[in-house]
């Protein structure tokens, strides 16, 4: 019996070859497939997105909003598509959006933007590695020219260097336009590294990634230096609004915030908030982002303050939000529609999408914090999150 998954050398992205793969797995597993084959787009769109296409996973998408954003790129009311199977999630974000809308919305700021590739160079000794870092400074313009020759969009911003023994780790920092840019910067950095290898004889060997870029995993360095977009979302909520909508004194929010800070500190968490990954993941799935980047993107820094009039200042800093509005999965059928729903598809829209995501995260943090304080966390999941 054939054990190889069916493939076509002529065109591996057709309905016919997908049918052959489903028939193959039905024969192997004795399972009758009824749902994977239901999709509305031409499989030809999937080149560069997936191999051995079989069908689609239908993840339900809910709509949260309106969300009022006062951003530099996102300004006005938005309805946010969220793909999830967690009951109460969309309702919780709606609750937070309703609260911040009453006090004028969420203000968002893009602070920094960088995507990295971090090669490592190996030398005979530490002194040669150190000298290499000095040579890079003297030849930066030539290195930049080589890197940027591979892309019409990516721009090299700077090169960081970190010495360890006879190793020299570099971090090439780029701006990548409306793309998330990991593949773009990999290609650009490879071209630069090859030029350096040919022009600096003391290099014994290099690897295109020495793992200092920490692709698709949290790292402290990216919380400090940024990977993707660094954003801040903030809102100030009047005390009487907290009392009327959340049904407890404003001072309780700050008290609970201090408690959750301590819990995060004890746990060694990458996040002193509650659940930034929830909103980020739901929007990522809906809009065709690389969901594995949630490992980095969900890092969040919460800062709060109770003002003299007892109003409550709340901010979320997201240091490494990796998103794109062009390339990757953003051009696929349903993902493109979800981006278009927020006017976030294509060129010039990536910072707008990033600001909407950051504002959504803030609303989710406020909502869950309020639910915990009001002892509604369990009851709301019992009411809306049960399907058993």
Image (cartoon, rainbow, N blue to C red):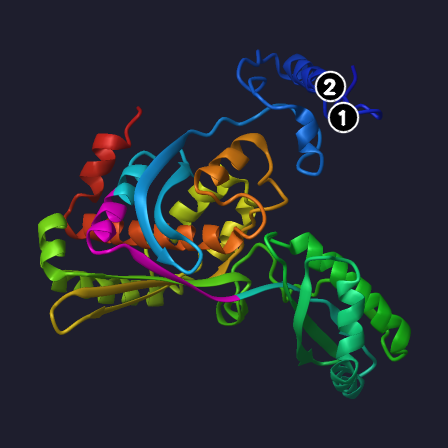
Mark 1: few, some, or many residues within 10 Å (few <14, many ≥20)?
some
- Circle 1 residue: 12
Q: Quadrant of residue 123?
A: bottom right
Query: Quadrant location of the N terminus?
Result: top right
Residue 144, given in percent of the width and then of the height, sits at 75, 71
Whether residue 49 is visible, yes or no, is yes
Measuring 46% from the left and 30% from the top, which residue is drawn there?
59
Left or right: residue 145 versus residue 43 is: right
Q: Quadrant of residue 24?
A: top right
Above-or-below relation of 312 to 89: below
Query: Quadrant location of the C terminus?
Result: top left
Residue stretch in magenta: 95-112
Q: Quadrant of residue 136?
A: bottom right
Residue toward you, 222 or 126: 222
Mark 2 residue element: helix
- Circle 2 residue: 17
Left or right: residue 361 versus residue 128 is: left
Measuring 64% from the left and 14% from the top, which residue is drawn there?
26
Measuring 15% from the left and 61% from the top, which residue is drawn there?
238
Q: First in sequence: mark 2 or mark 1? A: 1
Q: Is residue 101 magenta?
A: yes
Q: Do the residues labelled 2 and 1 touch (CB within 8 Å)?
A: yes
Q: Does the magenta stretch include residue 162?
A: no
């Amino acid at each position: 019996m054939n054990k190889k998954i069916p493939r076509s050398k002529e065109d591996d992205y057709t309905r016919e070859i997908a049918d052959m793969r489903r028939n193959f797995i039905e024969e192997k597993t004795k399972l009758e497939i009824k749902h994977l084959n239901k999709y509305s787009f031409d499989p030809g769109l999937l080149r560069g997105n997936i191999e051995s296409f079989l069908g689609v996973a239908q993840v339900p998408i809910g709509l949260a909003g309106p969300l009022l954003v006062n951003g530099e790129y996102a300004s006005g009311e938005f309805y946010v598509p969220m793909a999830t199977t967690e009951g109460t999630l969309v309702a919780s974000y709606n609750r937070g959006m309703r609260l911040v809308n009453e006090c004028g919305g969420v203000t968002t700021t893009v602070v920094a933007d960088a995507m990295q590739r971090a090669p490592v160079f190996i030398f005979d000794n530490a002194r040669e590695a150190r000298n290499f870092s000095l040579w890079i400074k003297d030849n930066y313009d030539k290195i930049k020219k080589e890197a940027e020759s591979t892309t019409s969009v990516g721009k090299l911003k700077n090169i960081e260097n970190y010495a360890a023994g006879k190793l020299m780790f570099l971090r090439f920092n780029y701006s990548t336009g409306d793309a998330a840019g990991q593949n773009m910067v990999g290609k650009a950095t490879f071209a630069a590294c090859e030029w350096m290898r040919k022009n600096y004889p003391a290099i014994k060997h290099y690897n295109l990634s020495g793992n200092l870029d920490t692709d698709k995993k949290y790292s402290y360095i990216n919380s400090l230096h940024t990977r993707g977009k660094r954003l801040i979302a903030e809102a100030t909520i009047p005390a009487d609004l907290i009392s009327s909508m959340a049904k407890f004194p404003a001072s309780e929010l700050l008290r609970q915030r201090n408690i959750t800070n301590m819990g995060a500190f004890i746990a060694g968490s990458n996040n002193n908030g509650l659940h930034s990954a929830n909103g980020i993941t739901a929007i990522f799935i809906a809009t065709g982002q690389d969901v594995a980047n949630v490992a980095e993107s969900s890092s969040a820094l919460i800062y709060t303050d109770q003002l003299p009039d007892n109003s409550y200042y709340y901010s979320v800093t997201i240091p490494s939000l990796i998103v794109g509005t062009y390339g990757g999965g953003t051009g696929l059928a349903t993902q493109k529609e979800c981006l278009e729903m927020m006017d976030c598809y294509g060129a010039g829209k990536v910072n707008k999408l990033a600001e909407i995501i950051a504002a959504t995260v803030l609303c989710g943090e406020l909502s869950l914090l309020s639910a915990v304080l009001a002892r509604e966390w369990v009851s709301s999941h019992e009411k809306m999150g049960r399907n058993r």
